[in-house]
Image (tube, rainbow, N blue to C red):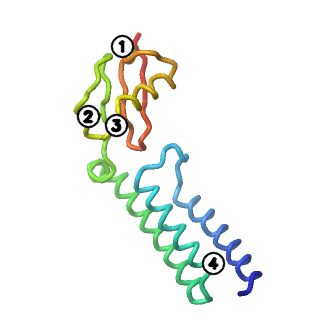
């Protein structure tokens, strides 16, 4: 196995991926949705195989990664133009607490334990659900807490 070639391929894939991800407008890591994570997992698989395969495998992997970047761009564009489609696929924010009262139905639907919710409440400097005006499970999995006045 030619180690110098692996190093050169790795550098190329790294630069290609950085350029491609910049082009399609990646978000902050905390804002990634489930679709973004799937995209990253698949593209990293293509990149890994490209580095370790022969010449044909390398170019096939780069082509597959480029196609996936274009596909991801098109899907994100469609979601921007058709918000209803985006909501159907990516989901919507879910209300967990309203004026100190827990919405147990939504907690159950999201398979979220009350202990996890309370942990997030404490991370926001609050000690009780009675101090929470709103707690919303965002599309990216984070819980937004708004304190009661």
Neighbour class for label 2 at 10 Å: few (<14), some, many (≥20)?
some
Asked if 84 appears above or below 68 in the picture, the reply is above
Q: Residue furthest right?
A: 4
What residue appears at the point 35 percent right and 34 percent down from the top-left corner?
113
Neighbour class for label 4 at 10 Å: few (<14), some, many (≥20)?
many
Give the label, 2 or 3, closer to the camera.
3
Label 2 to label 3: alpha-carbon separation: 9 Å
Upstream in sequence: badge 1 or badge 2 = 2
For the C terminus, the image quarter is: top left
Which residue is more in the foreground, 16 or 29? 29
Label 4 to label 1: alpha-carbon separation: 54 Å
The residue that disc 2 covers is: 106
Upstream in sequence: badge 4 or badge 3 = 4
Label 4 to label 3: alpha-carbon separation: 40 Å
Q: Quadrant of residue 58?
A: bottom right
Secondary element under disc 1, as helix, strand or loop, is helix
The residue that disc 1 covers is: 130
Label 4 to label 2: alpha-carbon separation: 44 Å
Question: What label does residue 112 carry, if any?
Answer: 3
Which residue is more in the foreground, 29 or 126? 126
Neighbour class for label 3 at 10 Å: few (<14), some, many (≥20)?
some
Label 1 to label 2: alpha-carbon separation: 18 Å
């Amino acid at each position: 196995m030619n180690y110098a070639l692996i190093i050169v391929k790795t550098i190329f894939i790294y630069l290609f991926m950085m350029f491609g991800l910049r082009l399609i407008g990646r978000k902050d890591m905390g804002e990634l949705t489930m679709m973004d994570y799937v995209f990253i997992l698949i593209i990293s698989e293509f990149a890994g195989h490209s580095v370790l395969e022969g010449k044909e495998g390398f170019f096939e992997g780069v082509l597959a990664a480029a196609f996936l970047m274009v596909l991801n761009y098109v899907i994100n564009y469609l979601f921007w133009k058709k918000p209803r489609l985006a909501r159907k696929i990516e989901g919507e924010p879910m209300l967990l607490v309203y004026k100190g009262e827990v919405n147990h139905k939504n907690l159950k639907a999201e398979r979220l334990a009350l202990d996890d919710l309370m942990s997030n409440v404490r991370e926001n400097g609050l000690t009780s659900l009675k101090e929470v005006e709103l707690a919303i499970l965002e599309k990216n999995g984070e819980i937004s807490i708004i304190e009661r006045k």
